[in-house]
Image: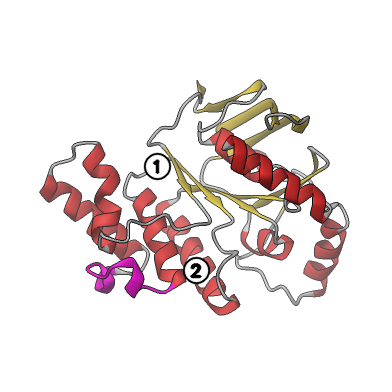
Amino acid sequence: MDEKGSGRRQKIMSIENVSIQRAFSGPILENISFDVKAGEFLSIVGASGAGKTSLLLAMAGLIQPVSGKIFLKNDEVTAPRVAIGLVYQSYALFPWRTALENVEFGLELQDVPRIKRRQMAIEALELVGLSEDKQKYPIELSGGMQQRVAIARELVNKPDVLLLDEVFSALDILTRRQTEEQILHIQKKLGITIVLVTHMVDQALALSDRAIVISGGAIKRIIQLEGKTPRSTDAPEFRKLLHSTEAMIKPLSKIEIFMKDMETVTTGR
């Protein structure tokens, strides 16, 4: 049911009347507004090309909306900051650095002393279950393990909000389920706020406290979810909600997706 119980937590981020458009095209999102609650697992779900990643990039301060504002703890987000971590679908690891050295990279840029950053990186890798693999290079790690290194690289900064951009979509189903459970464990242990962008409706409904459904450039529904996560996707009530949610999402045609991908390549947005 929509929004029930969502006020039990204080908000940590606010997205207020945000509109986003790509260069040489019309708006992809118009007047989007919602709050992110502290400590919640929030999913933004929609078809490919719906503007989910663009919204996430705006929340991270990497692109600016054409109108509207985004706030973190009442402070407007206009540029990237350590308090907002972002993990991409592609792992973006440095192949010449070990897992430990990859996690340390951001701390190096912040001039954290070597001994301290080494300990912080070790702790972050322990959180994602890779303490025994810290000296391995990316080529020695599976896709799921590389993704966990990328997550640890953001967790080491102790962000208030962790943004995840389709981080499970390239994984096989078994690895995906294991990584999802790892993320839920981390989220519960740290009490961190997580915002996941995904096109997989079942994933959003199984993992989240709330799911925001985006289609046609607008929010179609905000679904308040209850019960222990991950939820059983075989339960009749879950299947009913899954089917009704999928019906709200209008997928773009292949040519529309192709044109949006071409705009992303040529404009970087």
Task: Give left or right: position of 82 versus 132.
Answer: right
Residue 182: x and y in percent read 46, 67
In the image, residue 138 lies in the stretch drawn in magenta: yes
Residue drawn at x 67%, y 58% is 204
In the image, residue 234 lies in the stretch drawn in magenta: no
Label disc, if present, on residue 120 of the rendered structure: none
Residue 103: x and y in percent read 29, 54
Task: Give left or right: position of 208 versus 83.
Answer: right
Most foreground residue, 35 or 17 = 17
Mark 2 sits on what residue? 179
Magenta residues, start to end: 131-142
Task: Give left or right: position of 254 versus 44.
Answer: right
The reply to whether the C-beta atoms of the residues labelled 2 and 1 are less than 8 Å apart is no
Residue drawn at x 12%, y 47% is 114
Residue 10 shows up from this direction: no
Q: Earlier in the sequence, mark 2 or mark 1?
A: 1
Mark 1 sits on what residue? 159
Q: Quadrant of residue 15?
A: top right
- Residue 255 vertical position relative to residue 14 in the rendered view, above or below: below
Most foreground residue, 219 or 73 = 219
Q: Residues within 10 Å of mark 1 (few under 14, many from 20)?
A: some
Q: Amino acid at mark 2?
A: Thr
